[in-house]
Image: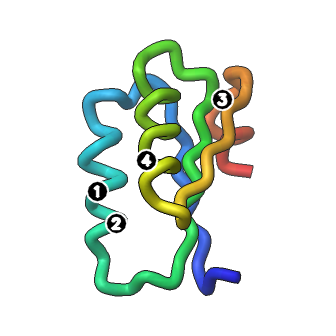
Amino acid sequence: MSTISVIIPIYKAEFYLHRCVDSILRQTFTDFELILVDDGSPDGCPAICDEYARKDSRIHVIHQENMGVSAARS
């Protein structure tokens, strides 16, 4: 079990998503899980999230219907 869980709600963030996830993955602390919550994003975010999850076992993706940022954070 990871020491820290980092949760990122995602909606229409295709332009910034790589920069955000790459920044977290570059941290020197590595005992974490990264949970990407795709809140029904209509752009390329779902595919980007899945690609990261395939490359790094610490990354988990949740795809859900758009319910807003509050629901994506819970």
Q: Give the number of the disc on residue 56.
A: none
Residue 21 place in picture, x, y as percent: 36, 53
Upstream in sequence: badge 3 or badge 4: 4
Q: Dot 3: few (<14), some (14–19), or many (≥20) neighbours within 10 Å?
A: few
Instruction: Look at 51% across and 13% down and name the residue there.
Output: 42
Q: Count the labels in the image.
A: 4
Report how far apart the C-alphas of labels 3 and 2 lie in the structure: 26 Å
Q: Are marks 2 and 1 in contact (CB under 8 Å)?
A: yes
Q: Which amino acid type corresponds to the residue marked 3 in the rendered image?
A: Gly
Q: Dot 2: few (<14), some (14–19), or many (≥20) neighbours within 10 Å?
A: some
**Front position in the image: 58 or 34:** 58
Q: Are marks 4 and 1 in contact (CB under 8 Å)?
A: no
Q: Residue tagged by mark 1?
A: 22
Q: Dot 1: few (<14), some (14–19), or many (≥20) neighbours within 10 Å?
A: few
Q: Residue tagged by mark 4?
A: 52
Q: Nearer the viewer, mark 2 or mark 4?
A: 4
Instruction: Label 1, secondary structure: give it.
Output: helix
Can you say whether 62 is above or below 34 in the image? above
Q: Residue tagged by mark 2?
A: 25
Upstream in sequence: badge 4 or badge 1: 1
Residue 39 place in picture, x, y as percent: 62, 30
Q: Which amino acid type corresponds to the residue marked 1 in the rendered image?
A: Asp
Q: How is the image coloured?
A: rainbow
Instruction: Label 3, secondary structure: give it.
Output: loop
Image-quadrant location for residue 33:
bottom right
Instruction: Label 4, secondary structure: give it.
Output: helix
Residue 61 place in picture, x, y as percent: 61, 45
Instruction: Look at 67% across and 41% down and name the residue there.
Output: 62
